Image (cartoon, helix red, strand yellow):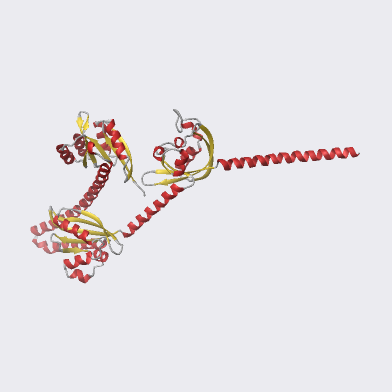
């Protein structure tokens, strides 16, 4: 299965603790990761302000300063990324102060395990993402309520100041209401509005169509019958009902989840409090049918699995190479050829992966006069520059293995692969040494045959002439 990729920054001035955290992170199952480390308060603040990483691990002790000060300063500078606080010993006071200052979690190094760290990283990222989404949705809803409230306040002021304009103000209010209704009816999302007691106050036609509710049932305004009609369609009605009750018990709460129907449909469900000024007057429910999107995501996942299996089981060496020439992934054939564990190959340059003769000692891939002519390096660079795929280009490289140098002739193909993160090149390498050798031998035999043929014809002509002269 495809894993997520996360960037982690450790702000820690102790090399042993850095090694411990790196070792624990190597056991992560839910995502691939990169770990970077800075050692000082100033470097940590600079990185937090840049916010280039997905999650930050922050040590309590940082020279003469401490992590609590750094969290507060980072939050004051607008940092919106999750920060997990690390300390050498358990201290409830420090724990609570870190959380109040904005830390996503608090972990004690002496008690730290891979599972504990994975859980903290995963949920800190997920929680921060949910907070951002909910904040954005809440801001949009509050803007709409505020706009509507301002319209009503303006109309009310006009009614108080100019009684003579009562009719015109009433018509304006009616027009505004019609616009709101028209807006609700124009959206594909199903909208349901209830008061604080859970009674239906408004809905749009999309809501009835999505839930397949008869008009006659809604017209009764019987909330219990309406709820039962909804529940009977769900795969897990008790779970939905419990969430509904929990939201009504906490009027200020917002919520989002997915609802799975018995007939296979899937809805995305949002719920936000309905406010007038600072008073909660009800709740707005929004439902969106995401069945097709989920099916598409599932198909994409299946395709990725299939491509991953093809990649791993291919009879040729296959690699994903980044723009700076480093190997991001390599299949089993490539690992077997290199004779090195896969995890040690990732991040190396191509020549280093296959022990190219020029990559030994102080030299490295691309550092000798022969390297600009390296077929793999040249073809990968050409693919990035032109965006064009290359098929069956031939080349040769000299490798060293078990103190032995040998030349390998290769057929190289490349394809430019684009994803949301960056461009990569898929490199396929086939060893055609034997085939090339046989081709050269055939060419040699053909040339030899041609020479022998010409010599034999000359001998025949010379012999014929001597015989003729002897007979004269």
Tell me what residue is drawn at x 79 percent, y 38 percent.
Answer: 459
Q: Is residue 96 above or below residue 175?
A: above
Picture coordinates of residue 332, whole percent (x, y): 44, 44
Q: Seen in the image, is 23 located left or right of residue 327?
A: left
Q: Residue 160 or 441: which is nearer the viewer?
A: 441
Quarter occupied by the C terminus: top right
* Residue 218 x/y as whole percent: 20, 68
Residue 49, x across and y down, in percent: 25, 37
**Furthest residue to the right?**
472
Q: Is residue 234 above or below residue 377?
A: below
Residue at x-position 19% and y-position 67%? 226
Using the rendered view, name the quadrant where residue 365 is placed.
top left
Residue 63 is at least partly visible in this image: yes
Residue 325 horizontal side relative to residue 265, left or right: right
Q: Nearer the viewer, residue 168 or 50?
A: 50
In this figure, what is the number of numbered marks? Answer: 0
Which residue occupies the foreground of this view, 110 or 292?
110
Q: Locate residue 36, reporting x and y percent.
A: 31, 36
Q: In the picture provided, is 300 more to the left or to the right than 427?
A: left
Please identify the quarter of the rendering in which residue 203 is found: bottom left
Q: Quadrant of residue 447?
A: top right
Q: Is residue 37 left or right of residue 464?
A: left
Between 6 and 25, the one nearer to me in the picture: 25
Residue 426 visible in the snapshot: no
């Amino acid at each position: 299965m495809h894993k997520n990729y996360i960037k982690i920054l450790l702000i820690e001035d102790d090399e042993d603790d850095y090694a411990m955290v790196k070792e624990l992170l190597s056991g992560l199952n839910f995502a691939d990761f990169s770990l970077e480390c800075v050692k000082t308060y100033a470097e940590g603040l600079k990185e937090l302000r840049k916010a280039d990483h997905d999650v930050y691990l922050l040590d309590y002790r940082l020279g003469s300063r401490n992590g609590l000060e750094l969290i507060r300063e980072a939050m004051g500078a607008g940092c919106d990324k999750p920060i997990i606080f690390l300390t050498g010993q358990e201290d409830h006071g420090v724990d609570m102060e870190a959380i109040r200052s904005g830390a996503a979690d608090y972990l004690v190094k002496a008690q730290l395990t891979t599972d504990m760290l994975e859980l903290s990283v995963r949920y800190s990222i997920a929680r921060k993402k949910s907070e951002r989404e909910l904040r954005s949705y809440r801001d949009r809803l509050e803007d709409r309520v505020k706009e509507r409230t301002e319209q009503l306040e303006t109309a009310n002021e006009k009614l108080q100041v100019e009684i003579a304009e009562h009719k015109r103000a009433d018509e304006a209010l009616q027009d505004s209401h019609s616009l709101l209704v028209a807006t609700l009816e124009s959206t594909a999302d199903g909208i349901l509005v209830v008061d604080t007691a859970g009674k239906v106050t408004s809905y749009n036609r999309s809501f009835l169509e999505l839930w397949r509710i008869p008009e006659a049932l809604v017209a009764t305004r019987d909330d219990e019958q309406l709820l039962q009609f909804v529940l009977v369609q769900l795969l897990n009605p008790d779970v939905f009902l419990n969430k509904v009750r929990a939201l009504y018990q906490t009027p200020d709460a917002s919520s989002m989840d997915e609802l799975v129907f018995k007939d296979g449909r899937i809805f995305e469900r949002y719920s936000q409090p309905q406010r007038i000024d600072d008073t909660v007057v009800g709740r707005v429910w929004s439902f969106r049918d995401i069945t097709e999107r989920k099916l598409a995501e599932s198909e994409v996942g299946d395709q990725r699995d299939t491509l991953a299996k093809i990649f791993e089981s291919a009879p040729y060496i296959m690699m994903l190479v980044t723009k700076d020439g480093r190997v991001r992934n390599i299949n089993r054939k490539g690992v077997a050829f290199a004779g090195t564990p896969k995890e040690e190959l990732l991040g190396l340059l191509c020549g280093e992966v296959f022990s190219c003769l020029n990559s030994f000692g102080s030299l490295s891939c691309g550092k000798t006069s022969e390297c600009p002519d390296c077929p793999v390096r040249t073809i990968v660079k050409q693919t990035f520059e032109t965006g064009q795929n290359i098929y069956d280009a031939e080349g040769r490289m000299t490798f060293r293995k078990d103190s032995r140098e040998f030349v390998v002739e290769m057929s190289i193909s490349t394809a430019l692969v684009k994803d949301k993160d960056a461009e990569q090149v898929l490199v396929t390498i086939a060893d055609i040494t034997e085939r090339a050798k046989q081709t050269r031998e055939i060419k040699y035999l053909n040339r030899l045959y041609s020479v022998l043929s010409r010599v034999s014809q000359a001998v025949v002509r010379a012999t014929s002439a001597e015989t003729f002269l002897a007979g004269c």
